[in-house]
Amino acid sequence: MTDLQECRKEIDEIDSQILQLFEKRMKVCEDVAQYKIETGKQVLDSKREREKLDTLGSRAHGEFNSLGIQEVFQQIMAISRKRQYQLLTANGVGEEKDYQMVDQLPLKGVNVVFQGVEGAYSYAAMRAYFPEEIKSYHADTFREAMEEAASGRADYAVLPIENSTQGIVTDIYDLLTEYRLHIVGEQVIPVDHVLLGIPGSSLDNIRTVYSHPQALAQCKLFLESHQEWKTVKTENTAASAKKVKEEQKISQAAIASRAAGELFGLDILAENICHNDRNVTRFIIVSRNPVYEKKARKVSVCFELPHSSGTLYNMLSHIIYNGLNMSRIESRPIPGKTWEYRFFVDFEGNLEDPAVKNAIRGLEAESNRMRVLGNYELQEEA
């Protein structure tokens, strides 16, 4: 019978040898980094790594050991690269200042565009984020708002990106990759939907309810209790309130904010109609200027990956290995590339932090395409 204690003792001795060899390998890795600092050679050499893994796999005994040793050395080589990225960053190699740090964003006397009309939640987010001394105007669609900011006609655009009940606003994620705009701030506001109708109307009169698709979804349980009602999608919640006001039909109602009801002179026919009583929406503030505030503590990036096993794990390891707290990851399909995805990741940090620089260097080097979307102040839930 095998002595368990003897086996454990032998494993401990082997592990000690592995540790010594690992540290010896990492010392050589640092010498390699110094060579790459002096010559400008890239850290990642995919062809060499693949050849080395194939060779090691072929020398192992048995299929299990062959796959196992390749997995072990994949991790060792990934750790070696991370150490090299650290050394390159510490020596200031290849740092490109795409973003400029500022003490504060210029917010007074600026032009701001928001999607929707006055009374929309985007309007409320704008009023919460910016001081009174601004010029604001609305755009009918998200794309039009992006165009205004990209052209410079607006200094900033205010756009919804995520709701706590319905999740991400996919159109915004896609547009962020299409337009060279930068997230410079965020604003979280509570979403308190109410059912609005013209004065004199009541729930018994209603036959048609208008609202934005997300608002309709957020009030799904309430609407399902009124099967006799027809729902109609609109561009935004405030526009639906405006429509009800203008058409003056007792059979029409809108799901929108209390502010929209006050703005358009509508009565509240029902309240507390969202099935999530902690319903909030996060809005982003975008600008064509690549700036970030000194106090910024949140970084947003997007990247595209090779379509192969383990690539997402390897990419996220750059964030994890540098001790950064990842707060969100989303994916969107890449147009024209079947089953390939673009990933959006938020993590805490400032672009001046060495850990953030290391992570971004690794992400840039090992993805097909990568972009920093912004660095901005982290806002807690309202």
Image (cartoon, rainbow, N blue to C red):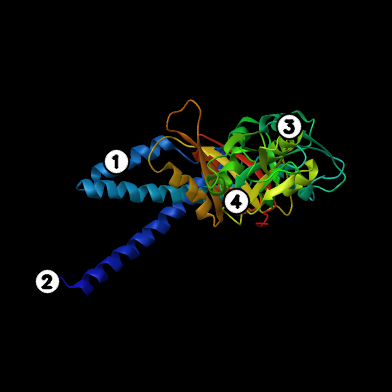
Disc 2 to disc 1, C-alpha distance:
36 Å
CB contact under 8 Å: marks 4 and 2: no
Check whether the beta carbons of the residues at disc 4 and disc 1 lie within 8 A of each other: no
Q: Is residue 101 visible?
A: no
Residue 340 sits in quarter: top left
Spot occupied by residue 136 in the image (x, y as percentages of width and height): 82, 38
Which residue is depicted at the point 72% across and 30% down?
150
Name of the residue lying farthest toward the left: 1
Task: Please give the label number shown on residue 247.
Answer: 3
User: Where residue 364 is drawn, which disc sits there?
Assistant: none
Q: Which residue is mark 1?
A: 55
Q: Is residue 151 above or below residue 135?
A: above
Say if 98 sits above or below 11 in the image: above
Q: Earlier in the sequence, mark 3 or mark 1?
A: 1
- Determine the CA span between mark 3 and mark 2: 89 Å
Check disc 4 and report the residue beneath it. Answer: 274
In this rendered view, identify the residue nearer to me: 292 or 22: 292
| Mark earlier in primary sequence (4, 3) | 3
Left or right, 345 with respect to 53, comes to: right
Task: Say if mark 2 contacts mark 1, CB within 8 Å.
Answer: no
Looking at the image, tell me whether mark 2 or mark 1 is earlier in sequence order. Answer: 2
The type of residue carrying mark 1 is: Thr
| Mark 2 residue type | Met
* Mark 3–mark 1 distance (CA, rounded to whole Å): 75 Å
Between label 4 and label 1, give the one nearer the viewer: 4
Q: Residues within 10 Å of mark 2 (few under 14, many from 20)?
A: few
